[in-house]
Amino acid sequence: MRSARVDREANKHLFGGASLEASLSQKDEALKETIATQTYEAHGGPLVDLLANGAECDGIRERAASLPVLRLSPRSLSDLELLAIGGYSPLNGFMTEADYRSVVSEMHLISGIPWPIPITLAVSATEAEAIAEGSDIALADVSGRVLAVMRVEQKFAYDRRLEAREIYRTEDEAHPGVAAVYTQGDVLLGGPVRVFELPTHEDFHQYRLTPAQTRTVFAQRGWRTVVGFQTRNPVHRAHEYIQKCALEIVDGLLLHPLVGETKSDDIPAEVRMRCYEVLLENYYPQDRVLLSVNPAAMRYAGPREAVFHALVRKNYGCTHFIVGRDHAGVGSYYGTFDAQRIFEEFAPGELGITPLMFDHTFFCRRCDEMASVKTCPHDGEARVTLSGTQVREMLKGGVAPPIEFSRPEVARVLIEAMQERVTPHHAI
Ligand SMILES: [Zn+2]
């Protein structure tokens, strides 16, 4: 069993062995001022904290024991965790109908604050029948361990196809995000949650920083501007280049891979984490980068999810966010630059985080350096580019991609992982 308290212990190494609080007390007032100021720069107001502690925690836990228990899907469980730690500020629970409808059709909460993705709790009609509006329920993980209490303000029906069209821009059930909407329950429960224990995780404890913790690290390192990088893939040279271009104009980089539920053919999170570790160890200045994981589930909503990813990173303390080509896309559902153009649909300053847009990047043999289609005048032959399929085939065959494409340390991790997967003993 791992509580938020235990996770804070696991994070001690980040603060030079001292506890977070002790380490802070050694810092000067100006720094505390920075942290305090940043606290008010969460999306839509102060950073939300739905984690009960002390006496309140015991009280809620006791009350939860007498309530009907709803077991959450892995996706809803990640949503609960992000709600609890403020990653979804200003949300304080699962959306009620008015917010849900407004988010689907207007990309804004009814308060007028931008929000592009519904955060909803779907249940079957049978489950919904047993729950009265205005009553409390206990929320549990898949094993049945109770973590939170929710006040069910509303239960409401919704239009799946409308949600698919508006959020995912397709009704095709082959789209993994759409498929998730089509297969979830018929009724949505909306209302605030109070969490007394965070979901447990088997892995990456030292990287599970909450938004409050990443903000503290940023402040301790004196970073006034921080760029966030979302990824669910290994970082190859092209993405390293983008991150470093961004880092030339800001103080720090938050490498924030998503480790919640992803498609089964995405590379497993533990392999990706090993790739990031060897990459950062060998090629990044340690005092300019923070590796932490984002517990969110992937929705593959392309443009809408790009805005969502940016807002969540704002809550983690980022001032800038990298948006690449086909950000958060899947298959060919979205145009290459749709995820960049959607930012223009918001008024200047409305989102409160600056998107940094990047085009296709690669190593060019004529330029003899990393470049993009914006900066390199040469044709395709000079450019070292490989498709995802080509890279997978090479790695499966034990062949490292050229060093202009992948750092050898990263390629080695990927080759080893591929070979483990094809060994029958380790078959997945
Ligand atoms: Zn060139």
Image: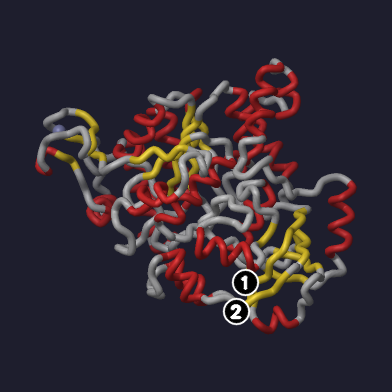
Which residue type carries mark 1?
Ala
Q: Is residue 196 above or below residue 156?
A: above
Q: Residue at x 38, y 28 (%)?
A: 283
Cα–Cα span, label 1 and label 2: 7 Å
In the image, 216: left or right of 66? left
Q: What residue appears at the point 17 percent right and 34 percent down from the top-left corner?
A: 376
The amino acid type of the residue labelled 2 equals Asp
- CB under 8 Å between callouts 1 and 2? yes
Q: Earlier in the sequence, mark 1 or mark 2?
A: 1
The answer to whether one can see residue 240 in this image is yes
Q: Mark 2 points at which residue?
A: 186
**Image vertical order of residue 237 relative to residue 343, above or below:** above
Tell me the crowding category of disc 2: few under 14, some 14 to 19, or many 20 or more residues within 10 angstroms, Cα based. Answer: some
Location of ligand 1 given as a quarter of the image: top left
Label 2 residue SS: loop
In this view of the protein, can residue 200 be seen by the observer? no
What residue is shown at x 77% (from left), y 74% (from top)?
A: 133
Query: Mark 1 sits on what residue?
Result: 122
Colour treatment of the image:
secondary structure
Q: Quadrant of the C terminus?
A: bottom left
Q: Residue 276 at x, y = what percent?
A: 43, 39
Q: Nearer the viewer, residue 255 or 300?
A: 300
Quadrant of the image occupied by residue 186: bottom right
Residue sitting nearer the eye, 360 or 427:
360
- Where disc 1 sits, the SS reads strand
Q: Does the residue labelled 2 lie within 8 Å of ligand 1?
A: no
x%, y% of residue 28? 70, 15
Given residues 33 and 396, the one toward you in this image is 33
Residue 161, compared with residue 332, is above or below; it is: below
What x and y, as percent, mark residue 137?
A: 78, 68
Residue 73, horizontal then vertical, whole percent: 61, 67
The residue depicted at 55 percent of the width and 54 percent of the height is: 115
